[in-house]
Image (cartoon, helix red, strand yellow):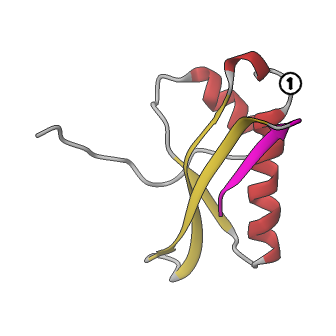
Amino acid sequence: MSFVAEIGDQFVGFVMAYLTYVREQVSEACVNQIFGVDPQYQRQGIATKLIQALLDKCLSKKIKLVCTMFEERDSELQGFFKRLGFDRGRYIDFSKNV
């Protein structure tokens, strides 16, 4: 469930995702693990195309839930994903540095 964006022979962006099962729904879900776009190519719609390719692949596989995680304070990413139709999920992430 990973994609790359190329312009000419240069890689300019990527998205890496994996499939997992969500226990509450007992259904398959796709988790966007990480994505990025070369700073020289940002704000050109490349990230949108990458995430849309991921969503389209999920639709073709009948996967109905796509999740992503990022820092709560990152309002730019929140806005990006909201524009793509994502809403805040039901789960809270807890972590601990050891």
Considering only vertical position in the picture, is 91 above or below 35? below
Which residue reaches farthest front? 9
- Badge 1 marks a residue whose secondary structure is loop
Reply yes or no: does residue 6 show up in magenta: yes
Image position, residue 62 (x, y; %): 75, 78
| Residue 44 versus residue 57 in the image, above or below | above
Question: Residue placed at 81% from the left, 50% from the top?
Answer: 52
Mark 1 Cα shell of 10 Å, populated few (<14), some (14-19), many (≥20): few
Residue at x 65% of width, y 47% of height: 15
Kind of residue at disc 1: Gln
Q: Quadrant of the N terminus?
A: bottom right
**Measuring 69% from the left and 46% from the top, which residue is drawn there?**
86
Q: Does the segment drawn in magenta span residue 5?
A: yes
Residue underneath mark 1: 44
Considering depth in this image, is 26 or 42 the residue closer to the camera?
42
Seen in the picture, residue 77 relative to 1 is either above or below; the reply is: above
Drawn side of residue 24 relative to residue 47, left or right: left
User: Is the stretch drawn in magenta largely helix, strand or loop?
Assistant: strand
Q: What residue is drawn where x is 78% and y is 22%? A: 41
State the extent of the magenta-drawn residues as a range: 1-8
**Left or right: where 42 falls relative to 92:** right
From the top left corner, tell me how far across and down residue 27 is, in percent: 56, 81
Q: Quadrant of the C terminus?
A: top left
Residue 64 position within the rendered picture, expressed as x and y whole percent measured from the top left: 70, 71
Figure label count: 1
Of all residues, the one furthest to the left in this rendering is: 98
Judge left or right: residue 29 versus residue 64: left
Determine which quarter of the picture holds residue 97. Answer: top left
Outermost residue toward the top? Answer: 40
Question: Which residue is at the far bottom?
Answer: 26
Residue 19: give x, y in percent of width and height.
55, 70
